[in-house]
Image (tube, rainbow, N blue to C red):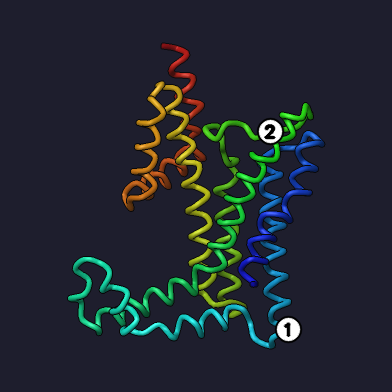
Amino acid sequence: MYTLIILFIIIVIPIPIMLRHMLSGRSAYRGVLEGSISAVTGVAFVFLLFWALTGVTFFHVMTTALDRISAADMTQMSSYMMGLDKISPTHLQATAEQMKEVTKLAVPGTLIVFSMVIAYFNYLVISWILIKTGKKIVALPPFRFFALPKSAVVGFLVIYGLAYLTVSLGIIDKHLLMFNLEMIFSFVISVQGLAVVFFVGHRKRIPKVVLWIIVAIFVVTILGETMLFFIGLIDIILDIRKRFYQTNLKI
């Protein structure tokens, strides 16, 4: 039930905030950001409500459920996968423990990333509907023009510094905080890298089918994800798209 409530909150709560941005002429991406922040705040409230009603935290319940996963469960699941039925129970148990630890650490960051993605598509759908009705609104620019401000790098460093201070004071677990910060920052910077790929593909008039295949390769491979991160980081610092556009104008 709580999963459905969380999903409902992530989808519905940002709508009024994004509508205000659309109709008032404010930045579309700012509307997406504030919408995703409101969704995360709503989810945090659900977690607090869960704790108030049950006396235990949502994360404790999740951890208890994950701790029930054993090597036997992994063996049973692996029997459906080619070749994995020959892996030793010891190795499977180690794999299960690693998966449980990563899952525990990744929950906050995953919720934040998921809220951002849902808010973005939410904004696209709502703005498309309003435009069809004749409303004058601020629509999202094409994804290929998505860009973080150059000050974002400084902002990331400041947040990392504050996070390090928080960890040093023992306010929050080091692994939990750093893991989620790295997840969120890597995601946002990689999104900018992806926007650069779409921009170059559009400028070079690469067929959409080919471009989507290239994008899929970037997204589903470790090397591709790493490249997206560095492309996004370089674009934030050097503004690759602006230089690319100016170069093509001279030609």
The residue at the point 41 percent across, 44 percent down is 228
Residue indicated by mark 2: 139
Image quadrant where one finds the C terminus: top left
Q: Are marks 2 and 1 in contact (CB under 8 Å)?
A: no
- In the rendered structure, the answer to whether residue 104 lies left or right of residue 228 reads right
Give the residue at the far front of this rendering: 80
Which marked residue is nearer to the observer: mark 2 or mark 1?
1
Residue 212's spot in the image, x, y percent? 40, 36
Q: Position of residue 211 (x, y in %)?
A: 38, 32
Residue pictured at 51% horizontal, 40% vertical: 236
Quick one: SS at disc 2?
Answer: loop
Q: Residues within 10 Å of mark 1 (few under 14, many from 20)?
A: few
In x, y percent, where is residue 188?
53, 49
Q: In the displayed structure, would residue 178 be above or below residue 23?
A: below
Q: Specify which label sits upstream in the sequence, 2 or 1.
A: 1
Q: What residue would you read off at disc 1?
A: 53
Q: Nearer the viewer, residue 1 or 164?
A: 1
Amino acid at pointer 2: Ala
How busy is the neighbourhood of tag 2: few (under 14 within 10 Å), some, or many (20 plus)?
many
Horizontal side of 190 relative to 136 (left or right) equals left
Q: Amino acid at mark 1?
A: Leu
- Residue 166 numbered mark, or none: none
Specify whether residue 175 is in view.
no
